[in-house]
Amino acid sequence: MSGKTTTLAERPALGRWRRWRPDQQWEGYLFLLPSFIGFLVFTALPILGSLALSFMRWNLLTPPEFVGLANYTQLLNQDPIFRRVAFNTAYFIVTIVPLQLVLSLLLAVALNQPLRGIQVYRLIYFMPVVATIVAAALVFQWMFNRDFGIISAFIWKVGEWTGMPVSPPDWLNSTTWARPAVVILTLWKNVGFSMVIYLAGLQAIPKELYDAAHVDGANAWHRFRYITVPMVSPTTFFLAIILMIGAFQLFSEPYVMTRGGPAQATLTIVYYIYQNAFEFGRMGKAAAIAWVLFIFIFIFTYIQTRLQRRWVHYEAGEG
């Protein structure tokens, strides 16, 4: 081929599709096609289907019936169980997210020291992450048992040692203690994951900052408060987002440990979706709850994204 080569600016204003030549890029589109088909079939279409289903009444046995906004109005105005599960979900969010952030950061700082055999300690603390949640929940069911659980036995021993009349609570059968039991299991299971993310953030902090602070007389607390915490704030922001979304979607822990009880004390929004869809046969209402949950997650994620400008410090950002 010969002739004058034209630059992009010299080319006539053509539409996007007219500029595309099949002999140049079709291989790339061909490689993307399986992923695009998978996204379309397994993600986009089910999302649109659930949105359409939320406006219908359907029990899987009779044809769907269009009911408009009835599922949403009934859910928000006439369903006391939904208000209870929303409270339970909020309880898990405000307990699990901050506790997991603090514990994982402190653990990461402790395991970021140049000690002999530190890799073994990191592995030990990360092991709960790879354990199956069903097995872990069954073990914790035994641990929280008031009659023969190891936690109750420890509390009895503490009472004997101190001479105080200490009585362990009936964890999983108490509306007061069932939620803390689920929180403890969730923290034990997931702190190792956040710890690894924090370790990566800590190791990206320039050592010169600590050396300069040490020369200026800063003690360990000052170095943690004024160097470590601000420098890992982007990591904290990332973890806060994904932990909040995970807490909104809490299901396996209360499902295996308490079945949502006692008296719906550990029933979460996702568990309520499962009950309506597969136990009560209310597919339309379950879809409506799922979309309300999506709106909750979107709003809180947007708020966190807006607020991060006030406390997240990027190394080359506007500060």
Image: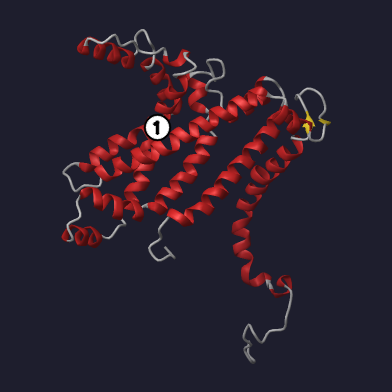
Q: Quadrant of the N terminus?
A: bottom right
Q: Relative to residue 28, is residue 62 depicted above or below?
A: above
Q: Position of residue 286 (x, y in %)?
A: 68, 30
Check disc 1 and report its element: helix, strand or loop.
Answer: helix
Task: Give x and y (percent) for residue 86.
Answer: 59, 30
The mark total stands at 1
Colour mapping used in the image: secondary structure
Q: Is residue 180 visible?
A: yes
Q: Which residue ends up furthest to the bottom in the rendered image?
A: 4
Q: Is residue 36 left or right of residue 151?
A: right
Residue for point 47% across, 18% down: 176
The answer to whether residue 182 is above or below residue 42 is above
Residue nearest the viewer, comparing 265 with 36:
265
Residue 24 position, x and y percent, is 62, 72
Q: Residue at x 72, y 25 (%)?
A: 78
Q: Is residue 101 above or below residue 28?
A: above
Indicate the quadrant containing the C terminus: top left, top right, bottom left or bottom right: bottom left
Q: Which image quadrant for residue 95?
A: top left
Q: Is residue 203 visible?
A: no
| Residue 263 in which image quadrant | top right
**Left or right: residue 250 compared with residue 223:** right
Q: Is residue 291 left or right of residue 89?
A: right
Label 1: how many Cα within 10 Å (few below 14, some 14–19, many 20+): some
Name which residue lies at 41% across and 17% down. Answer: 141
Amino acid carrying mark 1 in the image: Leu
Q: Which residue is mark 1?
A: 187
